[in-house]
């Protein structure tokens, strides 16, 4: 956990403001100190007078106190503090959300990939987001896209930008698992009229939805929102430790690439001479853990506090939601290792831009059934939702700050004994998120020989699990056909 935040203490209050800091900033400090900030950047992006910036962990920080007019927009926009899930869902989809359905409202579901081989190859999953943004930019449907590029100074960090050329969109391909304050770009969208696409994590889409209520120009200028699925982000500290473990090599690196190779892929750094070096166990021969295998450890140690109370896994408020196809392949001739994205088209405007991209040949798309879509990523989404309910409930009892999700978080969904046990086991696996002092040595252990052995054993277990899942699906298809 972040512990006692220095938010207020570190601020350089001008003398005349010492006894009377603006009420709004006190409110914002309470949100950050209470562990409710998910670092979406909305407060920074919406502030009309440029009062706020970021600290080194990307939490909002006061940079220019004398410009604060106490307008309270920064607090009102904050989705970490308050997000009226049911009311906003009804506004967007004209129906009450079913809180037991982790997949939210959607019109169609597909698996897809970019028709450009390079984009598919470079994309995190099937390169659908990059392919779609490029098509929209080149056809004139947008003037720019809000994306996350790699920070040129701290390579593992993301940096929000508005990409206005094909090259800039391409430079942003690949997921960055350290959270980046995407919504800080609201200020640029508000300053510069135009049509934009917005790519963000579920919490960032929440910030966007709230910001549109406060400033309708954002709703007019952003023609489509594309949400990424998200189990959790990873604290910056984890990447700092990993970076240290790379020693001298990291100092000469030009780029951090979160995944080379198709799902699950493996992270690499690009060295000064252009060659690639694996981030994990680069000196070992044979087995080398994938991105996903190490990220599963990182999540257990370094899930940020607000991610533990976040229950939107599949970007329920985006026009289009995109993730990995965590499911058995729906046809015998589909090999997910070639690169596929799983896509939920949630709104008419999302479906329209997606259809145009398919008709113009930018995307190759295959519909999947509702049943297949609801099974895809279900384990991750259910785990996340139940984790959030569990932590919110505990924090409520302990009198700690909790996010205001309206009625959504007050109604604990019906649950079986098995669901209860699974949630408790999942919570136990996150124990180190609640004892931050111990997690550094644990991560260091996993980056050493003992950790390598455990990862290897876990790899065999996972291989068997997926083999059995895919074989069962194959035999079911042969016996009953695809339903
Ligand atoms: C923190 C995080 C957690 C995720 N967890 C899951 C998960 O549990 N299950 C799952 O199925 N998928 C998850 N994803 C999504 C998945 O990794 C892919 O991003 C998604 O499938 C899209 O792939 P693509 O090839 O179509 O996108 P690409 O063509 O590779 O484009 C990716 C786009 O995402 C943007 N982006 C990258 N990192 C960030 C970021 N940190 N914040 C905002 N935008 C960003 C880039 O700007 C780029 O435009 C996660 C992504 C992130 C960033
Ligand atoms: S708006 Fe976003 S960045 Fe600002 S305090 Fe709230 S959650 Fe944090
Ligand atoms: S949004 Fe308003 S209250 Fe918040 S920091 Fe900016 S000027 Fe101050
Ligand atoms: S888990 Fe929620 S709060 Fe955390 S990064 Fe993902 S969407 Fe944002």
Image (cartoon, rainbow, N blue to C red):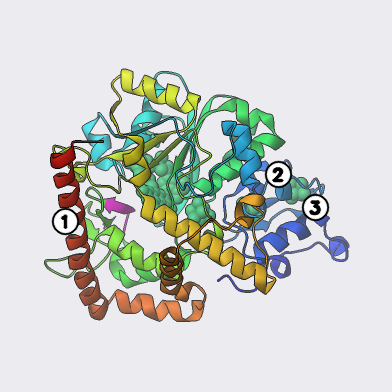
Discs 3/1, front: 1
Q: In terms of secondary structure, where does tag 3 sit?
A: helix
Residue 22 coordinates in the image, percent (x, y)? 82, 56
Which one is nearer the viewer's eye here, 433 or 381? Answer: 381
Depth check, front residue: 254 or 219? 219
The reply, left or right, for residue 98 in relation to residue 277 is right
Q: Mark 1 vs mark 2: which is more N-terminal?
A: 2
Which of the image's four quarters has the N terminus? bottom right
Residue 318 in sight:
yes
Q: Is residue 255 magenta?
A: yes
Residue 66 is marked as: 3
Query: Label 1: which residue?
Result: 467
**Residue drawn where x is 32% and y is 18% of the image:** 359
The first of marks 3 and 1 along the sequence is: 3
Label 2 neighbour load within 10 Å: few <14, some 14-19, many 20+: many
| Label 1 crowd (10 A; few <14 / some 14-19 / many >=20) | few
In the image, residue 262 lies at what x, y percent?
Answer: 23, 47
Expressed as whole percent of the image width and height from the top left, the position of residue 67 reads 78, 48
Residue drawn at point x = 33 percent, y = 46 percent = 376
Specify which label sits upstream in the sequence, 2 or 3. Answer: 2
Question: How far apart are the two marked residues, 1 and 2, measured between alpha carbons?
Answer: 51 Å
Q: Is mark 2 within 8 Å of ligand 3?
A: yes
The quarter holding residue 248 reads: bottom left
The structure residue drawn at horizontal position 54% and vertical position 50%, both measured from the top left corner, is 181
Residue stretch rendered in magenta on the structure: 253-259
Residue under label 2: 47
Q: Is residue 2 above or below residue 407?
A: below
Dividing the picture into quadrants, the one containing residue 16 is bottom right
Distance from the alpha carbon under mark 2 to that under mark 3: 13 Å
């Amino acid at each position: 956990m972040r512990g006692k935040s220095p938010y207020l203490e570190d601020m350089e209050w001008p003398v005349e403001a010492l006894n009377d800091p603006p009420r709004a900033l006190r409110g914002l400090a309470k949100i950050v100190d209470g562990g409710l900030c998910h670092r979406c950047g909305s407060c920074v992006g919406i502030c009309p007078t440029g009062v706020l910036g970021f600290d080194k962990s990307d939490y909002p920080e006061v940079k220019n106190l004398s410009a604060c007019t106490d307008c309270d927009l920064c607090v009102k926009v904050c989705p970490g503090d308050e997000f009226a899930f049911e009311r906003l869902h009804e506004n967007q989809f004209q129906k009450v959300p079913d809180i037991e359905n982790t997949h939210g409202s959607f019109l169609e579901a597909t698996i897809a990939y970019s028709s450009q081989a390079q984009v598919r190859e470079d994309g995190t999953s099937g390169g659908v987001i990059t392919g779609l943004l490029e098509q929209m930019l080149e056809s004139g449907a947008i003037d720019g896209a809000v994306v996350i590029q790699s920070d040129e100074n701290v390579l593992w960090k993301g940096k929000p930008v508005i990409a206005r050329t094909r090259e800039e969109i391409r430079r942003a391909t690949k997921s960055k698992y350290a959270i980046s304050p995407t919504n800080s770009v609201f200020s640029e969208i508000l300053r510069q009229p135009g049509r934009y696409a917005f790519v963000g994590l579920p919490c960032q889409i929440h910030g966007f939805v709230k910001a549109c209520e406060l400033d309708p120009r954002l709703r007019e200028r952003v023609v489509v929102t594309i949400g990424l699925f998200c189990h959790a982000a990873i604290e910056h500290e984890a990447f700092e430790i990993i970076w240290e473990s790379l020693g001298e090599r990291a100092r000469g690196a030009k780029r951090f690439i979160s995944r080379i190779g198709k799902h699950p892929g493996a992270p690499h750094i690009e060295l000064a001479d252009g060659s690639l070096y694996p981030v994990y166990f680069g000196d070992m021969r044979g087995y080398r853990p994938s991105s996903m295998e190490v990220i599963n450890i990182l999540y257990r140690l370094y899930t940020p506090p607000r991610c533990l109370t976040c229950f939107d896994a599949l970007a329920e408020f985006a026009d289009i939601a995109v993730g990995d196809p965590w499911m058995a392949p729906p046809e015998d001739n589909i090999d997910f290792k070639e690169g596929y994205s799983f896509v939920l088209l949630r709104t008419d405007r999302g479906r329209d831009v997606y259809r145009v991209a398919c008709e113009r040949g930018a995307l190759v798309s295959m519909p999947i059934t509702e049943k297949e879509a609801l099974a895809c990523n279900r384990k991750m989404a259910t785990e996340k939702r139940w984790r959030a309910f569990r932590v919110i409930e505990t924090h409520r009892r302990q009198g700690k700050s909790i996010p205001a999700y309206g009625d959504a978080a007050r109604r604990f969904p019906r649950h079986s004994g098995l669901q209860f046990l699974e949630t408790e086991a999942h919570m136990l696996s996150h124990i180190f998120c609640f004892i931050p002092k111990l997690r550094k040595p644990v991560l260091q252990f996993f980056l050493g020989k003992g950790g390598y052995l455990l990862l290897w054993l876990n790899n065999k277990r996972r291989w068997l699990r997926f083999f059995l899942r895919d074989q069962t699906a194959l035999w079911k298809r042969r016996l009953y056909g695809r339903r």
